[in-house]
Amino acid sequence: MHSSEFTMLEYYTMGTDYMDSLALTEELFEYIKSDPAQINIKNEKETFNKITIVEAFKKFAGFDLFAVYEKGGEAMEAQARRLGLEPERGMSAAQLYDLIFIHAVEPHLNMQKPVALLDYPAFIPCLAKKSPDGKTVQRWELYWNGSRSETSALELANCFSEETDPQKVKEFFINEEARKAELNVVKHNVDHNYWKLFENGGFPECSGTAMGLDRLVMAVTGKSNINMALVTDN
């Protein structure tokens, strides 16, 4: 499922947001299912199941994500232990969120139709615009197991309403540089002037999707790894 070399399909549209990109991605999957030789997605009103992060945590992890997160790391750790997980002491609330998501939420996204997981928490840093509620960002990820026999769904795509505020972009780069300097052995080169491209409306309102094309082929063809998905029988 992971490879150091893989193919990404990225598509961006100006004057749109993440929900416009989701509709465009649904069109792509409608095209895939129109070919009888390809995987059959049930002919229902919507191609994707759509569920928010908050709904997913309530349904699969059994708690209100933001209510618990606002109480701090100890409360998140208690939820992790309730779910049978064994988090390391001193993990941050954001790290515990990842742990719970991977073990208690993600395994349940193996539905027959692709699952669009919407409105990620704003406490997970990314360059997506904040939603009006201030608690979430305009982001979705797409999961699907397709015709693969494994029970786990593949994470296929990631999408934002792209952040266009120059100060927020600058702050993100500064924070990411500090985080990578602390965690990584190899120093990352950072363009400290990149944020200036966003000044005075220099960057358009837009939304972009990054699709793992190899994983999409895996899901459609029922293959269990990227190398098998790229090999054709002659």
Image (tube, rainbow, N blue to C red):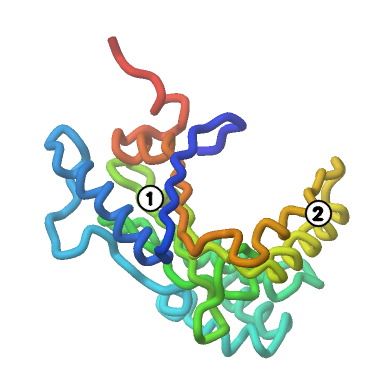
Left or right: 185 in relation to 176: right
Q: Which of 212 and 22 is in front in this view?
A: 22
Is 51 above or below relative to 196?
A: below
User: Helix, strand or loop at disc 1?
Assistant: loop
Q: Tell which tag, 2 or 1, sits nearer the viewer.
A: 2
Quick check: marks 2 and 1 in contact, CB under 8 Å? no
Pick the quarter of the image with the C terminus. Answer: top left
Count up the numbered dots.
2
Left or right position of 149 against 195: left
Residue 72 is drawn in which quadrant?
A: bottom right
Give the number of the disc on residue 151: 1
Tell me if residue 86 can be seen: no
Asked which quadrant contains residue 47, the reply is: bottom left
Q: How far apart are marks 2 and 1 (CA)?
A: 43 Å
Q: Does 6 sit above or below residue 68? A: above
Tell me which residue sits at (41%, 78%) in the image: 55
Residue labelled with disc 2: 192
Residue drawn at the location 57% of the way across and 29% of the way down: 5
| Camera-side residue of 59 and 142 | 142
The amino acid at mark 2 is His
- Label 2 SS: loop
Left or right of 25 in this view: 67: right
* Residue displayed at 50% across by 38% down: 1
Q: Residues within 10 Å of mark 2 (few under 14, many from 20)?
A: few
Residue 153 position in % (x across, y down):
40, 51
| Residue for point 47% across, 54% down | 208
The amino acid type of the residue labelled 1 equals Thr
Instruction: Please provide percent x and percent y for residue 188.
Output: 81, 45
Q: Nearer the viewer, residue 144 or 205?
A: 205
Above or below residue 123? Residue 158 is: above
